[in-house]
Image (spheres, grey):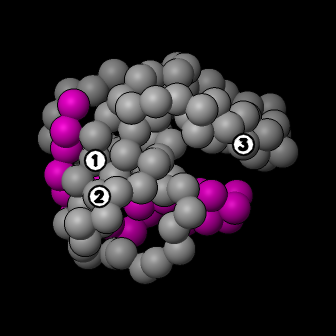
């Protein structure tokens, strides 16, 4: 599934955890969960770990460190790797994000 949208400011939770994300409001009805995929920013494609929940998509772009607030990006959702989970601590959440990123980096899109 391909989605386009403008990057909006979120709560900066991903950044606080060490995994900054590009947030896009969703108009599409997509099942919540963690997906592998890619994001195109200014014509360049980046692999991404993508979190979808309710009407928000958050993409952590691999090997990317730019301020893209307000920019239009294109997201391509690939394989869903897991459902949304609750974590007992911030440390457990960070460990799971790192596992998700490792798993996604081994996928072929």
* Residue 75 seen in render: yes
> Disc 1, disc 3: CB below 8 Å?
no
The reply, left or right, for residue 54 in relation to residue 6 is right
Callouts 2 and 3 close, C-beta under 8 Å:
no
Disc 1: CA contacts within 10 A as few (<14), some (14-19) or many (>=20): many
Q: Which residue is mark 2?
A: 40
Mark toward the viewer: 2 or 1: 2
Contact between labelled residues 1 and 2, with CB atoms less than 8 Å apart: yes
Callout 1 secondary element: strand
Which quarter of the figure is the C terminus placed in?
top left
> Mark 1 highlights which residue?
75
Residue extent of the magenta highlight: 1-24
Residue 86 lies in what quarter of the image? Answer: top right
Q: Is residue 6 above or below residue 25?
A: below
Q: Residue 4: horizontal and vertical position, in percent?
A: 17, 51
Distance between the alpha carbons at the discs numbered 2 and 1:
6 Å
């Amino acid at each position: 599934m391909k989605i386009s949208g403008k990057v909006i400011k979120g709560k900066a939770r991903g950044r606080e955890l060490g995994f900054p994300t590009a947030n896009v409001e969703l108009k599409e009805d997509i099942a919540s969960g963690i997906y592998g995929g890619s994001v195109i920013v200014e014509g360049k494609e980046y692999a991404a770990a993508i979190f979808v929940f309710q009407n928000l998509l958050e993409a952590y772009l691999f090997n990317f460190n730019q301020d893209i607030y307000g920019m239009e990006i294109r997201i391509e959702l690939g394989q869903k790797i897991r459902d949304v989970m609750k974590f007992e601590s911030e440390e457990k959440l960070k460990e799971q994000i790192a596992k998700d990123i490792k798993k996604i980096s081994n996928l072929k899109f």
